[in-house]
C-alpha cells in the first residue's frame, strides 16, 4: 500500500488539523510506509491542511552536534538531527529557521518570522517567549507522526515553566553564524546529563493528556498520529510537574529517590 499527498492531507483533516492552525510537527517518515513523493509530499500535505493562513513548524535540532567540543551553529549549514522530514523542510526556500544553537525551529507561513523571533536571545531552549511558548499562547497543536511522547519537545518547555530544579546542570559558550555570515555568542544552559534523570519518561504522562481531552488519535498508512492541544496540555501538565518535578521520570523516579537518599 502506498500513500499520496492527498491521502496524508485527508488523514490530517480527519484528525482535526484545520485551516489557520499553528502546527508543530514531530515525525518519522518511515513509520508511514511508502509515501509517493517522500518527505516533500508529507510537507505539502501539512501545508495544505493548515492552508495559506496557517503555520507549519518543525524542530531542526542540533543538540547532538553543537556542544562544548564543537560550539558553532550555522543557520544555513547545520543539519537537523531529528529526521528526514525536518531536514527536507528546513531547506525549502519559503522556510525560516530560528537561531537557537541547539533547539532551533523552522517554520513556514505568514506568521513565521514573528513565531521564531528572538529564540537566540535565551540561554535555555524552551522559555515561554520562545517558539515553544508562542505555540501555547497562539492556541497551537503538536502533531506526532509515527513517534510517541518521547519526541514531544514541548514537554521540555513544561519542565522549564514548572521550575524543575534539576533540569539544567551545565553551561556552555556556544556561537551562532547567521545566514549572512555575522556571528553571535549565545551562552547556553544544557539539559541535565545526570544518568538517573537524563532519560525522562514522557510517554508515562500520555494517560493524563487523554483524561484531560488534550490528545486525539488517527492513522496515516502505518503511522499512528497523535494531535495534542498545546494549551490544554500546558494547563494540565505544568502544575502537575511543578508540584512533583520527578513525575517526568515515570517509573525511573524510584531510582532518583535512591540516588538522592542512599540507604545507610
Image (cartoon, rainbow, N blue to C red):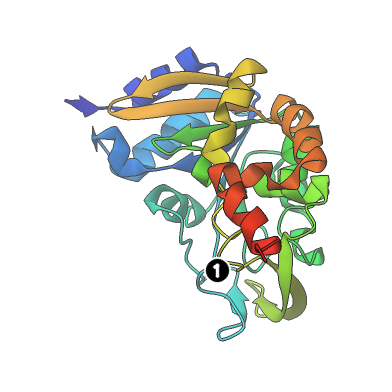
Q: Quadrant of residue 191?
A: bottom right
The residue at the far front in this view is 264
Q: Secondary structure at mark 1?
A: loop
Position in image of residue 131 (x %, y %): 72, 47
Q: Is residue 162 visible?
A: yes
Mark 1 = which residue?
A: 76
The N terminus lies in quadrant: top left
Comparing 90 with 149, the one in front is: 149
Comparing 92 with 186, the one in front is: 186
Q: Is residue 137 above or below residue 20?
A: below
> Taking 115 as reference, is 143 left or right?
left
Q: Is residue 114 above or below residue 23?
A: below
Residue in the picture at 48% in, 52% down: 92
The C terminus lies in quadrant: bottom right
Q: Is residue 153 visible?
A: no
The residue at the far top in this view is 14
Q: Is residue 170 above or below residue 62?
A: below
Residue in the picture at 41% in, 47% down: 85
Q: How many marks?
A: 1
Residue in the picture at 80% in, 63% down: 122
> Taking 130 as reference, is 247 left or right?
left
Q: Is residue 243 above or below residue 15?
A: below
Position in image of residue 240 (x %, y %): 76, 34
Comparing 52 with 191, the one in front is: 191
Q: Quadrant of residue 111?
A: top right
Residue in the picture at 76% in, 41% down: 244
> Taking 58 as reference, is 7 left or right?
left
Comparing 177 with 164, the one in front is: 164
The residue at the far left in this view is 1
Position in image of residue 97 (x %, y %): 62, 57
Amino acid at each position: 500500500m502506498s500513500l499520496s499527498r492527498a491521502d496524508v492531507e485527508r488523514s490530517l483533516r480527519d484528525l482535526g488539523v484545520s485551516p489557520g492552525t499553528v502546527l508543530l510537527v514531530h515525525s518519522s517518515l518511515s513509520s508511514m510506509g511508502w509515501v509517493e513523493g517522500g518527505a516533500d509530499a508529507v510537507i505539502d500535505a501539512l501545508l495544505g491542511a493548515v492552508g495559506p493562513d496557517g503555520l507549519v513548524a518543525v524542530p531542526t535540532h542540533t543538540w547532538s552536534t553543537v556542544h562544548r567540543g564543537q560550539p558553532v551553529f550555522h543557520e544555513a549549514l547545520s543539519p537537523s538531527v531529528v529526521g528526514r522530514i525536518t531536514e527536507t523542510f528546513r531547506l525549502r526556500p519559503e522556510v525560516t529557521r530560528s537561531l537557537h544553537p541547539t533547539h532551533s525551529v523552522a517554520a513556514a507561513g505568514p506568521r513565521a518570522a514573528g513565531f521564531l523571533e528572538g529564540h537566540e536571545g535565551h540561554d535555555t531552549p524552551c522559555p515561554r517567549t520562545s517558539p515553544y511558548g508562542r505555540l501555547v499562547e497562539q492556541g497551537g497543536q503538536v502533531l506526532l507522526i509515527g513517534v510517541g511522547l518521547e519526541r514531544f519537545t514541548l514537554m521540555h518547555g513544561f519542565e522549564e515553566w514548572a521550575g524543575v530544579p534539576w533540569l539544567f546542570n551545565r553551561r556552555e559558550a556556544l556561537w551562532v553564524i547567521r545566514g549572512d555570515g555575522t556571528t553571535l555568542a549565545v551562552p547556553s544552559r544544557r539539559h541535565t546529563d545526570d544518568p538517573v534523570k537524563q532519560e525522562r519518561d514522557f510517554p508515562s504522562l500520555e494517560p493524563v493528556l487523554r483524561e484531560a481531552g488534550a490528545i486525539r488519535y488517527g492513522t496515516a498508512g502505518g503511522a499512528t498520529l497523535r494531535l495534542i492541544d498545546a494549551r490544554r496540555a500546558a494547563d494540565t501538565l505544568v502544575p502537575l510537574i511543578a508540584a512533583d518535578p520527578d513525575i517526568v521520570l515515570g517509573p525511573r523516579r524510584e531510582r532518583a529517590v535512591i540516588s538522592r537518599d542512599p540507604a545507610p
